[in-house]
Amino acid sequence: MEKIFDPSPAAISLSRRRLLALSSVCVTVAVVGRVKKGSAQSIVASNRDGISDFMQLSVFATGHKNLDLGIGSALFLAFEAQIRDFSIQVTALRERIIKSGYQDVEALDAGLEGDPLRPTLLRIIRGWYSGVIEGGTNAKVYAFETALMYQPSRDVVVIPTYAHNGPNYWVSEPVSVDVMPAF
């Protein structure tokens, strides 16, 4: 057994068996992490048509042409997990829009008065605008900084946050100081 000496008070003993065990644990963690990522991608790939329909309906419902596909995929999968026949409802809404020739979401909303598809339309709009699909303290946030409710006034109003310069302010380059203050 070899001993590796460290300047710290505790000595670490490393044998071939420990090295082999540690290596196998690292490889297993790497493989499991890759499988989980691949399975999420396979879920999205298997629902490609459903996500495409959802994104097209979302563009019509929100009036925004450049919706984020990553957020849309996450919202779609969350809605599918929460609502039993969500894909069928999305397809029904899209068919209703095409069949009835609605020009905007206001006309669609008026046409869905009393219809069981109306709550689905409102949930989709709420999800895109608020970034969440359910209320409460345990609600999962799918979009915060990119939530649609903040986009119209983004250039003049700071998104509500406890960070002084807005969410993710540390990502951008800080403003340089032209003149050093004199004290």
Image: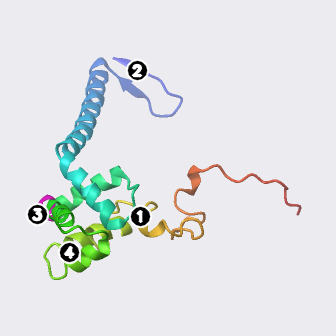
Amino acid type of the residue that numbered disc 4 sits on in the rendered structure: Pro
Among numbered discs 3 and 4, the one appearing first in the sequence: 3
**Depth check, front residue: 35 or 124:** 124
Q: Which residue is mark 4?
A: 119
Give the magenta-colored segment's residue range: 83-89
Among numbered discs 2 and 1, the one appearing first in the sequence: 2
**Callout 3 touching callout 2 (CB < 8 Å):** no
Among numbered discs 3 and 1, the one appearing first in the sequence: 3
Residue located at (60% from left, 66% from top): 164
Q: Secondary structure at mark 2?
A: strand
Amino acid type of the residue that numbered disc 1 sits on in the rendered structure: Ala
Quadrant housing residue 19: top left
Residue 131 in view, yes or no? no
Among numbered discs 2 and 4, the one appearing first in the sequence: 2
Q: Which residue is mark 3?
A: 84
**Callout 2 touching callout 1 (CB < 8 Å):** no
